[in-house]
Protein backbone atom coordinates (compact mmCIF):
# COMPACT_ATOMS: atom_id res chain seq x y z
CA UNK A 1 0.00 0.00 0.00
CA UNK A 2 1.49 3.40 -0.93
CA UNK A 3 1.41 6.69 1.00
CA UNK A 4 -1.54 8.17 -0.89
CA UNK A 5 -3.69 5.18 -0.06
CA UNK A 6 -2.68 5.40 3.57
CA UNK A 7 -3.51 9.11 3.75
CA UNK A 8 -6.86 8.52 2.12
CA UNK A 9 -7.73 5.76 4.55
CA UNK A 10 -6.58 7.97 7.45
CA UNK A 11 -9.10 10.62 6.48
CA UNK A 12 -11.93 8.10 6.23
CA UNK A 13 -11.45 6.73 9.75
CA UNK A 14 -13.40 8.95 12.09
CA UNK A 15 -11.96 9.28 15.61
CA UNK A 16 -14.02 11.45 17.92
CA UNK A 17 -13.32 12.37 21.51
CA UNK A 18 -16.05 12.99 24.02
CA UNK A 19 -15.50 14.25 27.60
CA UNK A 20 -11.85 13.19 27.61
CA UNK A 21 -8.48 14.57 26.59
CA UNK A 22 -6.70 12.19 24.23
CA UNK A 23 -2.99 12.42 23.49
CA UNK A 24 -1.74 12.42 19.92
CA UNK A 25 -0.14 9.01 20.35
CA UNK A 26 -3.33 7.47 21.71
CA UNK A 27 -5.32 8.78 18.77
CA UNK A 28 -2.61 7.57 16.40
CA UNK A 29 -2.78 4.14 18.07
CA UNK A 30 -6.49 3.95 17.18
CA UNK A 31 -5.78 4.71 13.54
CA UNK A 32 -2.89 2.24 13.38
CA UNK A 33 -5.11 -0.46 14.89
CA UNK A 34 -8.07 0.23 12.56
CA UNK A 35 -5.82 0.12 9.50
CA UNK A 36 -4.14 -3.07 10.68
CA UNK A 37 -7.49 -4.84 11.03
CA UNK A 38 -8.74 -3.58 7.65
CA UNK A 39 -5.57 -4.84 6.05
CA UNK A 40 -5.42 -8.17 7.91
CA UNK A 41 -9.07 -8.91 7.15
CA UNK A 42 -8.84 -7.66 3.53
CA UNK A 43 -11.64 -5.16 4.08
CA UNK A 44 -11.83 -2.63 1.28
CA UNK A 45 -13.86 0.59 1.27
CA UNK A 46 -15.43 0.14 4.69
CA UNK A 47 -14.60 2.25 7.75
CA UNK A 48 -15.64 2.56 11.39
CA UNK A 49 -16.18 5.53 13.67
CA UNK A 50 -14.26 5.36 16.93
CA UNK A 51 -15.52 7.32 19.91
CA UNK A 52 -13.02 7.86 22.72
CA UNK A 53 -14.93 8.68 25.85
CA UNK A 54 -15.07 8.46 29.66
CA UNK A 55 -16.40 5.82 32.08
CA UNK A 56 -19.68 7.62 32.61
CA UNK A 57 -20.67 7.73 28.93
CA UNK A 58 -19.63 4.16 28.24
CA UNK A 59 -21.57 3.11 31.34
CA UNK A 60 -24.73 4.74 29.95
CA UNK A 61 -24.30 2.96 26.60
CA UNK A 62 -23.49 -0.34 28.28
CA UNK A 63 -26.63 0.00 30.38
CA UNK A 64 -28.95 1.21 27.62
CA UNK A 65 -27.77 -1.00 24.76
CA UNK A 66 -26.50 -4.14 26.50
CA UNK A 67 -28.41 -4.01 29.81
CA UNK A 68 -25.11 -4.20 31.72
CA UNK A 69 -25.18 -1.58 34.44
CA UNK A 70 -21.49 -0.70 34.75
CA UNK A 71 -18.70 0.93 32.78
CA UNK A 72 -16.60 -1.21 30.44
CA UNK A 73 -13.50 -0.83 28.31
CA UNK A 74 -14.88 -1.20 24.77
CA UNK A 75 -18.26 -1.50 23.06
CA UNK A 76 -18.99 -2.23 19.41
CA UNK A 77 -22.09 -1.35 17.44
CA UNK A 78 -21.94 -3.19 14.08
CA UNK A 79 -23.77 -1.43 11.26
CA UNK A 80 -24.38 -4.78 9.54
CA UNK A 81 -26.47 -5.87 12.50
CA UNK A 82 -28.36 -2.58 12.47
CA UNK A 83 -26.77 -1.53 15.75
CA UNK A 84 -24.75 1.52 14.64
CA UNK A 85 -25.15 4.63 16.79
CA UNK A 86 -24.35 7.04 13.99
CA UNK A 87 -25.89 7.25 10.57
CA UNK A 88 -23.14 7.38 8.03
CA UNK A 89 -22.47 6.89 4.33
CA UNK A 90 -22.24 3.56 2.52
CA UNK A 91 -19.49 1.32 3.75
CA UNK A 92 -19.89 2.34 7.37
CA UNK A 93 -18.82 -0.58 9.57
CA UNK A 94 -20.31 0.75 12.78
CA UNK A 95 -19.08 2.44 15.95
CA UNK A 96 -16.47 1.46 18.48
CA UNK A 97 -16.66 3.19 21.85
CA UNK A 98 -13.62 3.06 24.12
CA UNK A 99 -13.33 4.37 27.66
CA UNK A 100 -9.96 6.11 27.85
CA UNK A 101 -9.77 6.12 31.68
CA UNK A 102 -10.50 2.37 31.77
CA UNK A 103 -7.93 1.74 29.04
CA UNK A 104 -5.38 3.75 31.03
CA UNK A 105 -6.11 1.78 34.20
CA UNK A 106 -5.84 -1.53 32.39
CA UNK A 107 -2.58 -0.45 30.76
CA UNK A 108 -1.18 0.36 34.19
CA UNK A 109 -2.27 -3.03 35.55
CA UNK A 110 -0.78 -4.88 32.59
CA UNK A 111 2.41 -2.84 32.66
CA UNK A 112 2.23 -1.48 29.12
CA UNK A 113 1.47 1.88 27.50
CA UNK A 114 -2.02 3.36 27.25
CA UNK A 115 -1.50 3.53 23.47
CA UNK A 116 -0.96 -0.21 23.36
CA UNK A 117 -4.08 -0.86 25.39
CA UNK A 118 -6.15 1.51 23.24
CA UNK A 119 -4.79 -0.18 20.11
CA UNK A 120 -5.70 -3.56 21.58
CA UNK A 121 -9.24 -2.44 22.41
CA UNK A 122 -9.62 -0.94 18.94
CA UNK A 123 -8.58 -4.22 17.32
CA UNK A 124 -11.03 -6.07 19.56
CA UNK A 125 -13.87 -3.68 18.68
CA UNK A 126 -13.03 -3.82 14.96
CA UNK A 127 -13.16 -7.62 14.96
CA UNK A 128 -16.62 -7.41 16.53
CA UNK A 129 -17.73 -5.01 13.80
CA UNK A 130 -16.54 -7.57 11.27
CA UNK A 131 -18.65 -10.31 12.82
CA UNK A 132 -16.23 -12.02 15.20
CA UNK A 133 -17.45 -12.82 18.69
CA UNK A 134 -16.41 -14.66 21.81
CA UNK A 135 -19.60 -16.17 23.14
CA UNK A 136 -18.82 -19.76 22.13
CA UNK A 137 -15.35 -21.08 23.14
CA UNK A 138 -14.63 -22.09 19.52
CA UNK A 139 -15.42 -18.57 18.22
CA UNK A 140 -13.48 -17.07 21.07
CA UNK A 141 -10.29 -18.91 20.23
CA UNK A 142 -10.60 -17.81 16.58
CA UNK A 143 -11.13 -14.18 17.62
CA UNK A 144 -8.27 -14.22 20.14
CA UNK A 145 -5.93 -15.71 17.56
CA UNK A 146 -6.81 -12.98 15.01
CA UNK A 147 -6.38 -10.37 17.72
CA UNK A 148 -2.96 -11.68 18.73
CA UNK A 149 -1.69 -11.80 15.16
CA UNK A 150 -2.91 -8.30 14.33
CA UNK A 151 -1.52 -6.80 17.53
CA UNK A 152 1.87 -8.39 16.99
CA UNK A 153 1.97 -6.87 13.49
CA UNK A 154 1.48 -3.32 14.82
CA UNK A 155 3.57 -3.53 17.97
CA UNK A 156 6.61 -2.04 16.22
CA UNK A 157 4.53 0.83 14.81
CA UNK A 158 3.31 1.65 18.29
CA UNK A 159 6.94 1.79 19.43
CA UNK A 160 8.15 4.08 16.68
CA UNK A 161 5.08 6.23 16.87
CA UNK A 162 5.74 9.31 19.01
CA UNK A 163 8.19 7.33 21.10
CA UNK A 164 5.56 5.05 22.62
CA UNK A 165 7.47 2.41 24.55
CA UNK A 166 6.74 -1.23 24.07
CA UNK A 167 7.80 -3.68 26.74
CA UNK A 168 10.78 -4.79 24.78
CA UNK A 169 14.47 -5.31 25.27
CA UNK A 170 17.57 -4.92 23.17
CA UNK A 171 19.13 -7.83 21.25
CA UNK A 172 22.39 -7.38 23.21
CA UNK A 173 20.52 -7.63 26.45
CA UNK A 174 18.76 -10.82 25.28
CA UNK A 175 22.09 -12.42 24.39
CA UNK A 176 23.51 -11.45 27.74
CA UNK A 177 20.51 -12.88 29.59
CA UNK A 178 20.64 -16.16 27.66
CA UNK A 179 24.35 -16.44 28.52
CA UNK A 180 23.53 -15.90 32.20
CA UNK A 181 20.70 -18.45 32.10
CA UNK A 182 23.11 -21.02 30.61
CA UNK A 183 25.60 -20.20 33.36
CA UNK A 184 22.91 -20.50 36.06
CA UNK A 185 22.04 -23.91 34.62
CA UNK A 186 25.41 -25.23 35.73
CA UNK A 187 24.26 -25.03 39.34
CA UNK A 188 21.18 -27.22 38.67
CA UNK A 189 20.67 -29.91 41.31
CA UNK A 190 19.21 -32.71 39.21
CA UNK A 191 20.13 -36.19 40.50
CA UNK A 192 16.78 -37.60 39.27
CA UNK A 193 16.01 -36.11 35.86
CA UNK A 194 19.57 -35.08 34.94
CA UNK A 195 17.85 -32.31 33.01
CA UNK A 196 19.41 -28.97 33.82
CA UNK A 197 17.52 -25.71 33.49
CA UNK A 198 18.73 -22.16 34.13
CA UNK A 199 16.87 -18.86 34.31
CA UNK A 200 17.82 -15.21 34.31
CA UNK A 201 15.17 -12.76 35.46
CA UNK A 202 15.60 -9.03 34.93
CA UNK A 203 14.04 -6.89 37.66
CA UNK A 204 12.71 -3.40 36.94
CA UNK A 205 15.53 -2.17 39.21
CA UNK A 206 17.95 -3.44 36.55
CA UNK A 207 19.18 -6.29 38.76
CA UNK A 208 19.47 -9.86 37.49
CA UNK A 209 18.22 -12.83 39.51
CA UNK A 210 19.54 -16.22 38.46
CA UNK A 211 17.91 -19.57 39.16
CA UNK A 212 18.36 -23.28 38.49
CA UNK A 213 16.11 -26.28 39.04
CA UNK A 214 16.48 -27.97 42.42
CA UNK A 215 15.14 -31.49 42.64
CA UNK A 216 14.13 -33.57 45.63
CA UNK A 217 14.01 -37.26 46.50
CA UNK A 218 10.27 -36.86 47.09
CA UNK A 219 10.05 -35.46 43.50
CA UNK A 220 7.06 -33.12 43.92
CA UNK A 221 8.90 -30.48 46.01
CA UNK A 222 11.18 -29.93 42.98
CA UNK A 223 11.55 -26.27 42.14
CA UNK A 224 11.94 -25.15 38.54
CA UNK A 225 14.68 -22.73 37.54
CA UNK A 226 12.21 -19.94 36.75
CA UNK A 227 10.56 -20.12 40.15
CA UNK A 228 13.93 -20.27 41.89
CA UNK A 229 14.90 -17.00 40.17
CA UNK A 230 11.52 -15.40 40.85
CA UNK A 231 11.38 -16.39 44.50
CA UNK A 232 14.93 -15.14 45.03
CA UNK A 233 13.89 -11.78 43.56
CA UNK A 234 10.63 -11.46 45.48
CA UNK A 235 12.33 -12.44 48.72
CA UNK A 236 14.75 -9.57 48.13
CA UNK A 237 11.96 -7.07 47.59
CA UNK A 238 11.94 -6.97 43.77
CA UNK A 239 8.32 -7.25 42.65
CA UNK A 240 8.34 -5.99 39.04
CA UNK A 241 10.17 -7.48 36.11
CA UNK A 242 11.23 -6.59 32.57
CA UNK A 243 12.25 -9.91 31.01
CA UNK A 244 13.06 -13.56 31.65
CA UNK A 245 15.49 -15.85 29.83
CA UNK A 246 15.34 -19.64 30.17
CA UNK A 247 17.86 -22.21 28.95
CA UNK A 248 18.34 -25.94 29.36
CA UNK A 249 20.32 -28.95 28.21
CA UNK A 250 17.82 -29.51 25.42
CA UNK A 251 18.36 -29.22 21.66
CA UNK A 252 14.97 -27.50 21.60
CA UNK A 253 13.82 -24.15 22.93
CA UNK A 254 12.88 -24.41 26.60
CA UNK A 255 9.52 -22.96 27.57
CA UNK A 256 8.40 -22.51 31.18
CA UNK A 257 6.14 -25.24 32.55
CA UNK A 258 2.48 -24.49 33.32
CA UNK A 259 3.06 -23.98 37.02
CA UNK A 260 5.83 -21.45 36.36
CA UNK A 261 3.64 -19.61 33.82
CA UNK A 262 0.98 -19.19 36.50
CA UNK A 263 3.47 -18.12 39.17
CA UNK A 264 5.12 -15.64 36.80
CA UNK A 265 1.69 -14.15 35.96
CA UNK A 266 1.36 -13.07 39.55
CA UNK A 267 4.27 -10.65 39.18
CA UNK A 268 4.92 -10.13 35.46
CA UNK A 269 2.86 -8.32 32.83
CA UNK A 270 1.30 -10.28 29.98
CA UNK A 271 3.60 -8.61 27.44
CA UNK A 272 6.82 -9.16 29.34
CA UNK A 273 9.36 -10.70 26.97
CA UNK A 274 10.25 -14.34 27.60
CA UNK A 275 13.39 -15.55 25.90
CA UNK A 276 13.40 -19.30 25.47
CA UNK A 277 16.78 -20.73 24.56
CA UNK A 278 18.20 -24.08 23.58
CA UNK A 279 21.47 -25.51 24.92
CA UNK A 280 23.50 -23.64 22.29
CA UNK A 281 22.09 -20.22 23.13
CA UNK A 282 19.79 -20.11 20.10
CA UNK A 283 16.52 -18.60 21.28
CA UNK A 284 12.99 -17.56 20.45
CA UNK A 285 11.25 -14.52 21.92
CA UNK A 286 7.69 -14.77 23.19
CA UNK A 287 5.58 -13.27 25.97
CA UNK A 288 3.90 -14.56 29.06
CA UNK A 289 0.51 -13.56 27.60
CA UNK A 290 1.17 -15.74 24.57
CA UNK A 291 2.06 -18.74 26.70
CA UNK A 292 -0.70 -18.27 29.26
CA UNK A 293 -3.58 -16.23 27.83
CA UNK A 294 -6.37 -15.34 30.25
CA UNK A 295 -4.25 -16.21 33.28
CA UNK A 296 -6.03 -16.41 36.60
CA UNK A 297 -5.17 -13.18 38.44
CA UNK A 298 -6.00 -11.55 41.75
CA UNK A 299 -8.47 -9.28 39.91
CA UNK A 300 -10.46 -12.41 39.03
CA UNK A 301 -11.21 -12.95 42.70
CA UNK A 302 -13.12 -9.65 42.97
N1 LIG B 1 12.06 -27.72 34.82
C1 LIG B 1 12.39 -26.41 35.01
O1 LIG B 1 13.29 -26.09 35.79
N2 LIG B 1 11.69 -25.46 34.35
C2 LIG B 1 10.67 -25.72 33.47
O2 LIG B 1 9.97 -24.81 33.06
C3 LIG B 1 10.46 -27.11 33.04
C4 LIG B 1 10.97 -28.16 33.97
C5 LIG B 1 12.81 -28.73 35.55
C6 LIG B 1 12.04 -29.41 36.65
C7 LIG B 1 12.74 -30.73 36.78
O3 LIG B 1 13.85 -30.58 37.64
C8 LIG B 1 13.26 -31.01 35.38
O4 LIG B 1 13.19 -29.78 34.67
C9 LIG B 1 12.47 -32.09 34.64
O5 LIG B 1 11.14 -31.79 34.65
Image (tube, grey):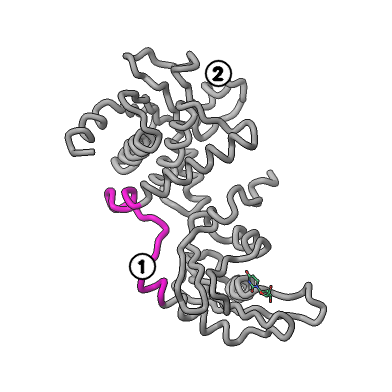
Q: Is 113 on the left or on the right of 128, as rendered?
A: left
* Residue at x-position 52% and y-position 30%: 132
Where disc 1 sits, the SS reads loop
Q: Position of residue 25 (x, y in %)?
A: 31, 43
Q: Position of residue 2 (x, y in %)?
A: 19, 39
Q: Where is residue 4 in the image (x, y as percent from the top left)?
A: 17, 34
Mark 1, residue position? 170
Kindly report the secondary structure that dominates the magenta region of the rendered protein. Answer: helix
Label 1, residues with CA under 10 Å away: few <14, some 14-19, many ≥20? few
* Residue at x-position 23% and y-position 35%: 6
Q: Where is residue 268 in the image (x, y as percent from the top left)?
A: 55, 60
* Residue at x-position 49% and y-position 44%: 105
Indicate which quadrant contains ligand 1: bottom right
Mark 2, residue position? 65
Q: In which quarter of the image is the N terminus?
A: top left
Q: In which quarter of the image is the C terminus?
A: top right
- Boundaries of the magenta span: 156-175
* Residue at x-position 43% and y-position 31%: 126
Amino acid sequence: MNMIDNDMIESLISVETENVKVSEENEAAVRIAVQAVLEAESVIGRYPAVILTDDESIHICNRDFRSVDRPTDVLSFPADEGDALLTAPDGFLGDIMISVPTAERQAEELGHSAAREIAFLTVHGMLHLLGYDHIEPEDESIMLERQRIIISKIEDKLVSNAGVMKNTIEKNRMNEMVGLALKAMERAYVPYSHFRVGACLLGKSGKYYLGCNIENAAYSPTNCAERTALFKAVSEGELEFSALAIASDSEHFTYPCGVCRQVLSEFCSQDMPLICSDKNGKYIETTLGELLPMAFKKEDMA
